[in-house]
Image: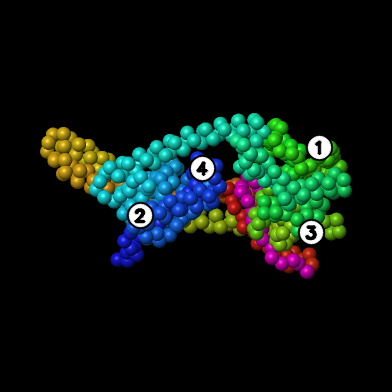
Amino acid sequence: MKKDVRKMNNVAIYLRKSREEEIETREETLARHERILNDYCVANRLNIAKTYKEVVSGESIEKRPRMKELLNDVENGLYDGVVVVELERLSRGNQIDQAEILEIFKKSKTKIYTLNKVYDLSSDNEFDEEFFEFGLFMSRREYKIIKRRLQRGKKQALKEGYYSHSNPPFGFTKKRINKGFVLQPHPTEADIVRTIFNKFVYENFDAWELIRWLHDNGIGSKRVDNWSYKSIRRVLKNKTYIGYIATDYVNGAPTNYIDGLHDGIVDVETFELAQAKLETKKTCTKYDTTLKNPLASILKCAKCGRTMQSRFSTNKYHYYLRCPNLKCDNVSTPTKYVEKEVIRELKECLDNYVIYVDNFADEMEKKRQANELEIDLVKKEIDKKRAMLTRCDEMLEEGIYSKEKYITRVNVLESDLKTLQSNLEALKDKCFDDIERTKTAIPKLSKVLEEYWNLDATNKNTLLKSIIDKIEYLKEEKNSRHNPEEIKFKLKIYLKI
């Protein structure tokens, strides 16, 4: 028997800031609510066992780690009650979240204390449960109204030059002035932005030279700790640095700007010279742009997740694959060796598929048929229970059942029905399509292996993408010399088929 670890009147406090309290910082709101709830617990002789402070924003339970921790502790019976300022602090999420909260508090017999009411969901008093459900429903409705109002307010503030997006661009902080936020130069990041523009425009650095210079000098911040080609271009093209604010985005890139209330941190002349240089590099046709890497966008670094890039070695006259993350120590390898290993592993996979089909196809088919038969039996039993529920209604109307007997009988039938539904879902979730999937994969793999070495890099890449989602690459040690037998790396292939 599970030991009951609760003590009488032991409660937990849950604190979360709502959207209506934007006038205060999160810390100020939580501190004020904590004082209120501490006084409430003292007045009502409640012993505070633990306080949970939600420091991240999130509508759903999944996005609130402290709420998930609280619900787990409540489910394990650690508290007699949970104390909140108001019911909606627990959830303004969807109906699934609200049902989960109700079920956990009900089964664990944990009370919910608010400043206005105590909810005892474990008692026979059905009104507490109804009040609880209605309260969460109303808080969800109110949340949607507030959200729409805030969105309208943000759009209006944006038109007036305020910064209404969540996070300011690199180089800025934001400060509330009057009815909105205005961008302010970041004490250290603003200087980094100016340095990037000056070196790009006046010292003729290209993007890769800037990345190397920033990395070698240890220049970064919490927001951009690892510079990349994309992050450098994002800085150089951002009009926010000359006093504008982006209003519209397509695929994460700004497409429209308006005048902001903030001052720029880069002068307009420098910014325009940077754009001219970027445009010149964009139209340059000096280099051959045909695809040279058959593993382009497929091969991923197993250490940091970045896409491996192909580079040409001028001193060894071959292409090699490397991680673009300068702080990652995943060792590079010549492309041809990785390519050969990919094809070798695909051939091994094909052989295993053929063996699997030859040995297990009949057995899996028998299991699938048995599962379908069991599903039919459960469905028939569900239909029978539903018919019995209908009969209960008729017997109540005819006066054969008293109200008490009707409720008892219906509760039993509904419990049985719930168990049957759960069994049905479990049976449906059983997977028996491995054989069919494998049979389908065999000809696709065979086609790739037959055609691969006769194609150019572009068509090789297309062929691999038709069957491979991604490949993870890992190499821990460098080679003493380029001997294929000494080049040791690991690949993990994720197939689409």
Whether pointer 1 and pointer 4 mark residues with C-beta atoms closer than 8 Å, the reply is: no
The label nearer to you, 3 versus 1, is 1
The label nearer to you, 1 versus 2, is 2
Q: Nearer the viewer, residue 8 or 129?
A: 8
Residue of label 3:
216
Measuring 55% from the left and 55% from the top, which residue is drawn there? 353
Measuring 51% from the left and 36% from the top, which residue is drawn there? 147
Disc 1 is placed on an element classified as: helix
Q: Give the amino acid at mark 1.
A: Val
The label nearer to you, 4 versus 2, is 2
Q: Nearer the viewer, residue 152 or 352?
A: 152
Residue of label 2:
43
Q: Nearer the viewer, residue 380 or 345?
A: 380
Residue 390 within the segment the image draws in magenta? no
Residue 373 visible in the displayed image: no
Q: Give the amino acid at mark 3.
A: Asp
| Lower sequence index among marks 4 and 2 | 4
- The answer to which quarter of the image holds residue 482 is bottom right
The label nearer to you, 2 versus 3, is 2
Disc 2 is placed on an element classified as: helix
Residue of label 4:
21
Q: Give the amino acid at mark 4.
A: Glu
Q: Quadrant of the N terminus?
A: bottom left
Q: Which segment did they paint magenta?
A: 461-480
| Lower sequence index among marks 2 and 3 | 2
- Above or below, 339 against 95 in this view is below
- Residue 275 is situated, as x and y percent measured from the top left of the image, at 81, 38
Disc 3 is placed on an element classified as: helix
Query: Residue 268, labelled with which disc?
Result: 1
Residue 471 within the segment the image draws in magenta? yes
Q: List the single residue furthest toward the bottom.
A: 480
